[in-house]
Amino acid sequence: CSNFGASDFNGEVTTIDNCKGNIVVIGFWGTECNPSTKMLEEFRNAQDQVKASQLKVIFWPVHFEIWPVVNSFTIKNKNHLGDLKVKKIGVGNNGLSNLVDTLDGLPTIFIVDKHGRISTTWSGFREQLLFNQLNKLIHEN
């Protein structure tokens, strides 16, 4: 899982291995998926809570779509994202196969612990599940 990566709008790739020591929350989403929009809102809210608490949690809302489509979505839905920085799925050595064989649906969330191991994963939006899983992981460490 450590080679999985995602790139920002400028094409700079960050891998899970680059983030060891932090909890990484990866959420795969799509612009046409209403549950994905709810996931983005929850990521935004969780990111705001994490900033206030000084915890080391990084949020990666990762998409598969082309940047013009995603940029249009982010402009129209700025309130869902706040200052979250969306990322594009990695390719080649940093591709999805480093994390999982297939995705069951969107959104799909992975929480990677500070050692670079997948702690938990689920598909679909379930209100408060992200907060509950993060709190459990934070208190274990």
Image (spheres, rainbow, N blue to C red):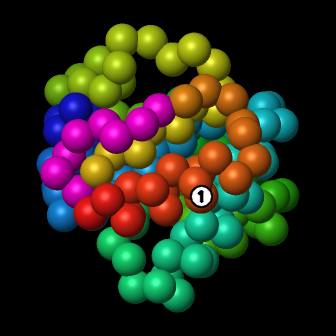
Point out the image quarter for the C terminus: bottom left
Image point 52% across, 87% down: which residue?
A: 52
Q: x, y (%) of residue 109?
A: 52, 37
Residue 26 image point, x, y percent: 45, 45
Q: Quadrant of residue 6?
A: top left
Residue drawn 32% across and 59% down?
A: 140
The residue closer to the viewer here, 114 or 30, is 114
Answer with the quarter of the image where residue 96 lies.
top left
15 left or right of 105? Answer: left
48 in relation to 112, above or below: below
Q: Is residue 124 in view?
A: yes
Q: Residues within 10 Å of mark 1 (few under 14, many from 20)?
A: some
In this rendered view, identify the residue nearer to me: 121 or 9. Answer: 121
- Residue 60, visible in the rendered structure: no
The question of residue 134 being in magenta is answered with no
Quadrant (top left, top right, bottom left, bottom right) of the N terminus = top left
Q: Position of residue 30 (x, y in %)?
A: 68, 34
Front residue of 72/53: it is 53
Q: Residue at x 33, y 72 (%)?
A: 56
Quarter residue 42 falls in: bottom right
For the residue labelled by badge 1, is the local secondary structure a helix, a strand or a loop? helix
Whether residue 58 sits left or right of residue 108 in the image: it is left
Q: Is residue 74 left or right of residue 48?
A: right
Q: Which residues are magenta?
A: 114-121
Tally the marks. 1
User: How far across and how far down the image is residue 2, in percent?
Assistant: 17, 39
Amino acid type of the residue tagged 1 in the rendering: Phe
- Which residue lies under the disc numbered 1? 131
Q: Is residue 117 located in the magenta-colored stretch of the structure?
A: yes
